[in-house]
Image (tube, helix red, strand yellow):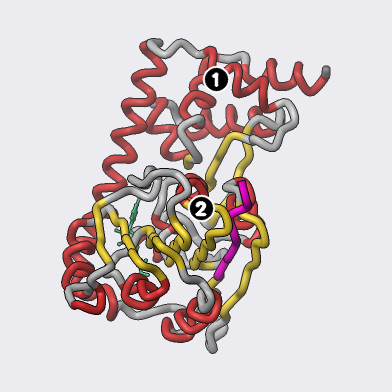
Amino acid sequence: MDDLLAILRAAGEPTRLRILSILSAGEMTVSEMTQALLQSQPRISRHLKLLAEAGIVRRFPEGSWVFYRLNEDNENFALVAELINLLPENDHTLLRDRERLSRVRAERSLRAQEYFAINASKWDDLGARHIPEDLVEAEMSAILSHAQCDLLVDLGTGTGRMLDLFGGHAAQAIGFDTSSDMLAIARARLDSPAHAHCQVRQGDCAAIPLEDAVAGVVIIHQVLHFLDDPARAVNEAGRVLAPSGRILIADFLPHEVEVLRDEHAHRRLGFSDDMVVDWMTQAGMVDVKPTHLHGKRDDDLVVGLWTGVKAEA
Ligand SMILES: C[S@@+](CC[C@H](N)C(=O)[O-])C[C@H]1O[C@@H](n2cnc3c(N)ncnc32)[C@H](O)[C@@H]1O
């Protein structure tokens, strides 16, 4: 009973209910919350501290940013979910919070789009801070060596490199990306009879425009660190994967290179195995395995490959 009372006490305050309402849209930084709720950072941080102490939210410090998300692992999370569910949909304050949050996110997304538009034509030549890409690709190739399927899906396809390399594993391969400039490069790359079975389409990996359980392979290569809600993309990948289908995610392990945020539109400074494995498991994958690829220099970023199989229905 004490745990339930702790939740009710912590949630029973207007600003904290507003925080729960916007966090139900996915993970968020303190700065985004201050802009959505129009309250000072110290005030929001104080409320978040109380919510964290009651086990309602979890905090993930990452470099100079801290991300917060609802703590779905709390054994009394059903109470939190019910409170959020009971919030009136037409409440003026909550509606305004969500509108401001959408504006903040749209501005951020626009900045990322501009970054990809500016860099699209030179993308494949941008200097890497990690183990050479051909070694990462060789490892991915080994992981996918036995995967043959009807449909391969590449999320955040960019210039279409993954379709070029791995499209041969499928009768049909589709890459989705939000940037039309990146897609233009991908189309040019794939414009050959050898790639006739490959296509690219504009689409957001937070809402993949595909039916459930249609893909035999899903690849997410160096995309998650750009996303507002990487867990949601992994969940969507799980939704479109057919039973026994394989997922392969490539991204960075946790690092402290803040300049990637400031100058290269990264939102997240890498991901731990625990985090990615948890998202994959929640999305219905089994046999989840991480691999770490270290570069030669001490300060090279470590690349993580996470692979798993969609559980049988
Ligand atoms: C670093 S590039 C990686 C491209 C590609 N996967 C590769 O390996 O060459 C990241 C790509 O993710 C795309 N992207 C960012 N946010 C996205 C989203 N929400 N949905 C789909 N694509 C997204 C960007 O437009 C960009 O093309």
Viewer-proximal residue among 174 and 204 = 174
The number of callouts visible is 2
What secondary structure predominates along the stretch shown in magenta? strand
Q: If the picture is divided into quarters, which one holds ligand 1?
A: bottom left
Numbered range of the magenta stretch: 305-313
Residue 261 seen from this side: no
Mark number for residue 99?
none
**Mark 1: few, some, or many residues within 10 Å (few <14, many ≥20)?**
some
> Residue 145 in the image: x percent, y percent?
51, 79
> Residue 87 in the image: x percent, y percent?
50, 13
Viewer-proximal residue among 217 and 176 = 217
Q: Say whether residue 73 is left or right of residue 293.
A: right
Viewer-proximal residue among 290 and 211 = 211
Amino acid carrying mark 2 in the image: Ala
Amino acid carrying mark 1 in the image: Ile
**Does 90 sit above or below residue 131?**
above
Q: Say whether residue 198 is left or right of residue 220.
A: left
Residue at 48% in and 85% down: 135
Mark-to-mark CA distance, 1 and 2: 32 Å
User: Tag 2 or tag 1, which sits nearer the N-term?
Assistant: 1
Q: Say whether residue 166 is left or right of residue 286.
A: left
Give the quarter of the figure containing the N terminus. Answer: top right
Viewer-proximal residue among 148 and 73 = 148
Mark number for residue 84?
1
Residue 59 seen from this side: yes
Pointer 2 residue: 242
Residue at 47% in and 48% down: 213
For residue 124, what is the image quadrant? bottom left
> Residue 37 in the image: x percent, y percent?
41, 26
The outermost residue toward the bottom is 296
> Residue 77 in the image: x percent, y percent?
67, 27
